[in-house]
Amino acid sequence: MTEHSEPIVPETTRRQMLAGAGALVFSFLVMPPARAVTSGRARSHPFQPNAFLKIGADSSVTVIVKHVEFGQGAATGLATLIAEELDADWSQLRIEFAHNDDGLYKNLRMGTMAVGGSTSMANSWTQMRTAGATARAVLVAAAAKRWRVPEQSISVSKGRIASGCKSTSFGELVADAAKLPVPTDVPLKAPNRFTLIGTRLPKLDSAAKSDGTAMFTVDVKLPGMVYALVAHPPKFGAVPAGFDGSAAMAIPGVRKVAAVKSGVAVFADSFPTALKARSALQIRWDDSKAETRSTTELFAEAARLADEPGFTVVENGAYPAALPEGAREIEAIYYLPHLAHAPMETLDAVMRARDGKLDVWLGSQFQVKETAAIAGELGIAEKDALLHQCYAGGSFGRRATPGNEFDIEAGQVCRAWGGPEPVKFLWTREDDIRGGFYRPVMVHKLRAAIAADGQIIGWDHRAAGQSIVIGTPLGGGAVKRGFDKMMIEGADEPGYRLNGHRLSIGVLESPIPVNWWRSVGHSHTAYVVEAFLDRLFAASGVDPVAGRLALLEDQRALAVVHRVAEMADWQRPRTAERTLGVAYAKSFGSYVAQIVEVSRGSDGLPRVHKVWAAVDCGIAINPDIIRAQIEGGIGFALGHALYGEITLGQGGEVEQSNFHDYRSLRIGEMPEVDVAIIPSDADPTGIGEPGVPPLAPAVANAWRKLTGEVVERLPFTRSIRSASQA
């Protein structure tokens, strides 16, 4: 990545400046606003309160992207929605990131600017299309007035406006259009009239990411900038009790050493110098409130809590008090470890506080709340804090925490510096792997009763683990009856007819910070439900695909399971060296079924050769991005299923630190992936996360068929190698 010096001007803004003839900015209101919230500085929004679209005199169409872009394709998706209704040519499209402003850019499903829950397209589906349709209507009105023809005679196609023998570009009409009233109620296209939605459009940011001009936070370099790192305690919950920074200060280029709430900060003229200075610190830690249990002890405590009455989540009929003649019972206990997110770009922020104003450069997932958190630590009013949204190098949930903890720490670091110079605050890879905010540790205990005819007549599911939101600012609204739904989502409504279905949950308390991880609760509940269900089918001699089809009721669920079985040619016999495994999960409104082909690798672990995936996520805005998200989710899930775990040793210290011992999937291990998108006329649903949940159970199911080995503790490398050493 290249580094940029001030002034930093987005490419789209530079183009508009060079165009010189002004631009037409369209604003519209889809939902009633509480009030317009601004940063207190000049904004290029002539119409308030919402602005998503600018058309330049050069006919460029700039889409104001309200969601962070960290590789999931949201920017291209939002631009597609506007371009479709505007009837723009794809070559006209540009993107520009929105500033922090809930009044203009909030996620309509979350009430604030945010990306989460795979909602980017779902919450923008009507909003952004309306923006495009509104712009089109004003351009048509301007053309009709100029040509003195009825609006009904005018057509718009690929960025050109025409009536009879007359034709013009968007840019030639912007001055006229800017003088006209903006309609508040415009019709939207029926799906059968779409020309861009549903087609494979190239991502708008691919060139910038390829040539290095895309602005990531790690790229930002401002005049006089200092670099900051924080030394964190080796145990979660520990706090600094005192430190000696004299050795660090003796290093040339070190500017300052200061205590912050989370540890000790060092400030230097360069990142290598800051890293060297941090290593030279002598710090005493107070471990009196620290987590000192090992992973083994945490699992044991969670297993104990699962046996307690806990909180009842589902009680659908009674588990049989006594088994009828010919029935049998099967039990299992699954251990799911902490997992790090490990995005390629670690946490970072650039802050400049001077003259009572704050500028923040950040790949922010919660733009308003994060900027406000930094400003709050500096005593700066929210209206005086401006976010310069950057690209982010991945997240998988890491950049969104319930309490904005990284941003609070960043604000404290900036305050500790105390000068007008910009501060670039970074976490290293080791900070990230050891720093917590992991997927929660969970234990699931399942028991099922199967009648003589193979029918499931009882399903008892007891689970325990950490909650993401209990004890956080989000806990009040998200916690119901003592637990939060994210702990058990997917297991509460698995989609199958389960007689005597009971589900309970216990809460494990620990200072280890946990967070949303790609697909959240579904990442572990799909594993236990689908792996256990497959074992029940095997015990009854039921085909796993046929068994699922018999228990599913939702027609969209049935469709993806049918389709994936066709894709994989499920009934075709395989060799003894390779087997197939299947799994299904509905998450974030989308339906995904996967079949994997597995053999035993030379290392003794599952070798996944191919994955077939069928997905129904509503109307496919960009099929290529959908396929990419499913493919990426499969690779992400497979690497973590095979190798991923964060473990605490005796005393509570994290044992992993970087990619050498927190292993990711390697390119040579990535299977071939075949994705089928089920045609749908339903509104779009999530796609960033639903590719993850079915993969691990599908591999487990294939592995059990191949070897007879049941994997009850992830990752596979621990269970399989532990079994081979026993």
Image (cartoon, helix red, strand yellow):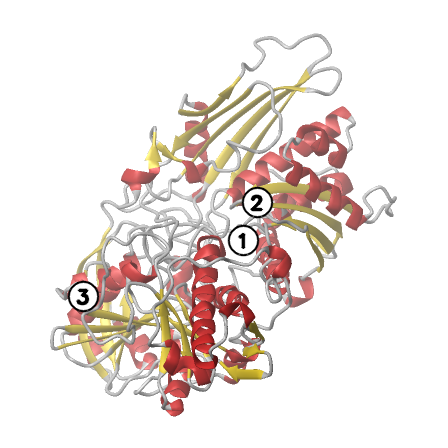
Which circle, 2 or 3, is nearer the viewer? Answer: 3
| Residue indicated by mark 3 | 383
Front one among 5 and 64? 64
Q: Position of residue 435 (x, y in %)?
A: 36, 58
Task: Give the CA distance from mark 2 to mark 3.
Answer: 47 Å
Query: Do the residues bearing badges 1 and 2 touch, measured as CB atoms within 8 Å?
Result: yes
Q: What kind of element bears circle 2?
A: loop
Q: Position of residue 652 (x, y in %)?
A: 36, 48
Disc number for residue 644: 1
Q: Is residue 605 above or below residue 443?
A: below
Q: Specify whether residue 631 is in view.
A: no
Q: Quadrant of residue 591?
A: top right
| Residue indicated by mark 2 | 714
Q: Position of residue 121 (x, y in %)?
A: 49, 57
Q: Quadrant of residue 57?
A: bottom left
At 39% from the left and 76% from the top, the residue drawn is 177
Say what amino acid the circle numbered 2 marks. Leu
Residue density around tag 1, few if under 14, some if 14–19, many if 20 or more, within 10 Å: many
Say what amino acid the circle numbered 3 marks. Lys
Residue density around tag 3, few if under 14, some if 14–19, many if 20 or more, within 10 Å: some
Front one among 458 and 209? 209
